[in-house]
Image (cartoon, rainbow, N blue to C red):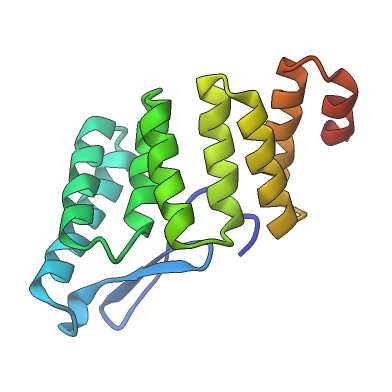
Amino acid sequence: MGNMSRPFILAAALGVAVVTFGTSTLVGAERGDGAAADTAAYALYRDGQGLARERRYPEAIEAFTRAWALAPQHPVTLVHRAHALYLLNRYDEAIADYSAFIAARQGEANAYWSRAQAFSGAGNFRAAIADADAALSLDPGLSGALYYRAYARYRLGDQAGALADAR
């Protein structure tokens, strides 16, 4: 799944939706095998997904925040909240959520790439390059990480590095 640009709903079968970001999953408790908090968290998570698709980002952030409070064992919720925060130019908050996700689930190239985007938005181009490098070390074919590394290099005055990444 290395070149996913966004978290997405992978499948819905037998009444169980599986949401994935890289290799991290949040399995819906619709089968009845989860605790009440997991079921409520999953419902809020799905609400947040719908609100985000409708570009109602402040409401999506609230839904993801409530889901996370109920089920912090599912850090994938943070990725979706971080993306909504990023889209509202709330870069520092997005960086914090991506960082918490990375701490919980190391080895997710897409998380590093997404945090690189947020670092770029915040103007921290050196951190963006470091995260793009981390993403590319995990998934050398992740073109989005190359793009953000090229952009950050360009912004730091490294035209040669930016051109190398763009090729």
State the quadrant of the N terminus: bottom right
Q: Residue at x 63, y 33 (%)?
A: 128
Residue 8 appears in the rendering: no
Residue 113 appears in the rendering: yes
Q: Residue at x 89, y 32 (%)?
A: 164
Q: Position of residue 61 (x, y in %)?
A: 25, 39
Q: Residue at x 56, y 33 (%)?
A: 117
Q: Residue at x 76, y 29 (%)?
A: 150
State the quadrant of the C terminus: top right
Q: Position of residue 64 (x, y in %)?
A: 24, 48
Determine the residue located farthest toward the left in the rendered image. Answer: 36
132 vs 7, left or right, is right
> Quadrant of residue 132 in the image?
top right
Q: Position of residue 62 (x, y in %)?
A: 18, 40
Q: Judge by depth and name the residue closer to the eye, 114 or 119.
A: 119
Q: How many marks?
A: 0
Q: Judge by depth and name the residue closer to the eye, 53 or 83.
A: 83
Q: Position of residue 96 (x, y in %)?
A: 39, 39
Q: Judge by depth and name the residue closer to the eye, 28 or 86.
A: 86
> Quadrant of residue 156 in the image?
top right
The correct choice, above or below, for 53 with respect to 37 in the image is above
22 vs 90, left or right, is right
